Image (tube, rainbow, N blue to C red):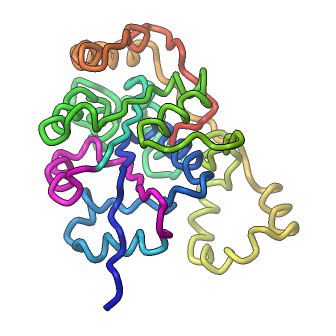
Amino acid sequence: MSKAAPLPDFVIIGAAKGATTWLRNQLLARPDIFLPKPEPHYFSREYERGEAWYRQWFAGASPGQLVGEKSADYLADPQVPQRMHRLLPDARLVVQLRNPVERAYSDYCMFYRRGSVSSDIRRYLDTSRPGPEPRFLADGAYHQHLARFLEFYSGSRLKVVLYEDIADRPEAVVREVEQFLDLAEPASPVPLVDSANVKDAPLLPLTLRRALAPAKRWAVPFRSQSWFKAIRGTLAREIEYPALPGDLRLALCEHYAQDVASLERLIGRDLGHWLAAEPKGESHDVRAA
């Protein structure tokens, strides 16, 4: 009888647009860590598939490797903490938090880039009425979300990383996470790995993307070819994102003020800059996937 695949020792639980892909890429650079690149989303949207399905994600792990996974929607899903604790009671959790105003705007921009939302930004980020994409606002209520996890996991099992710390001292943040996971310091420094999620990268026009969608799978083998890159480079354009109006930013700051105050007390960090009329300490190099 074959041995069952392992379960994760640690989980990067979000937040979405908080640089979780960046951190996953840094950890993947270590040979003593196994992480599947796609997000399993097991404890959120795929829970009905069952434990056997979930274990398959980690079947490629080698003996001695520390096993983890990253699904950025775990943090905000109210069902996840209990489900996760039931299967992974000893897991260590890493959470990455970004200014909730900037997180909401970045999330909106991601959907806009995909063509999933319109340029009417107020329709999606207006705090006075429910929007068609609740996650844009709801996902930034970090204290509320963390409180649910702390009902099942002790604070010692939770590592909080701030987005601005990644921008200011990325190597130190990676080492802090490695220490949290009880990983030995590498004999030689591991170079930082760039994220593949680039908000400002040129993209084919939306109408053309939709027209070519049926051929997307067919084109995969040719993407590395120089002629394919040349054609795409000729057609691709930078996307102009709708700006976040000043009054809407202020409304978002007011919307998150109470939750941010509670979060400050929980993690022992001053987060007042998150609620400034003009963002401070916010990096726009798009490592925030």
Q: Is 278 on the left or on the right of 153, as rendered?
A: right
Above or below: residue 19 compared with residue 29: above
Front residue of 260 and 56: 56
Percent of width and height locating residue 103? 42, 31
User: Which quadrant holds the N terminus?
Assistant: bottom left
Q: Is 284 on the left or on the right of 80, as rendered?
A: right
Image point (14%, 50%), residue name: 82
Front residue of 188 and 127: 188
Percent of width and height locating residue 166? 55, 28
In the rendered structure, does residue 77 fall within the stretch colored magenta?
yes
Image point (19%, 47%), residue name: 81
Magenta stretch?
61-90
Above or below: residue 277 compared with residue 224: above
Quadrant for residue 216, please give it: bottom right
Q: Is 286 on the left or on the right of 161, as rendered?
A: right
- In the displayed orientation, state which residue is furthest to the bottom: 1
Percent of width and height locating residue 252? 33, 19
In the rendered structure, does residue 14 fall within the stretch colored magenta?
no
**How many numbered discs?**
0
Image point (30%, 41%), residue name: 135
Image point (81%, 68%), residue name: 228
Front residue of 167 and 225: 167
Above or below: residue 123 compared with residue 232: above
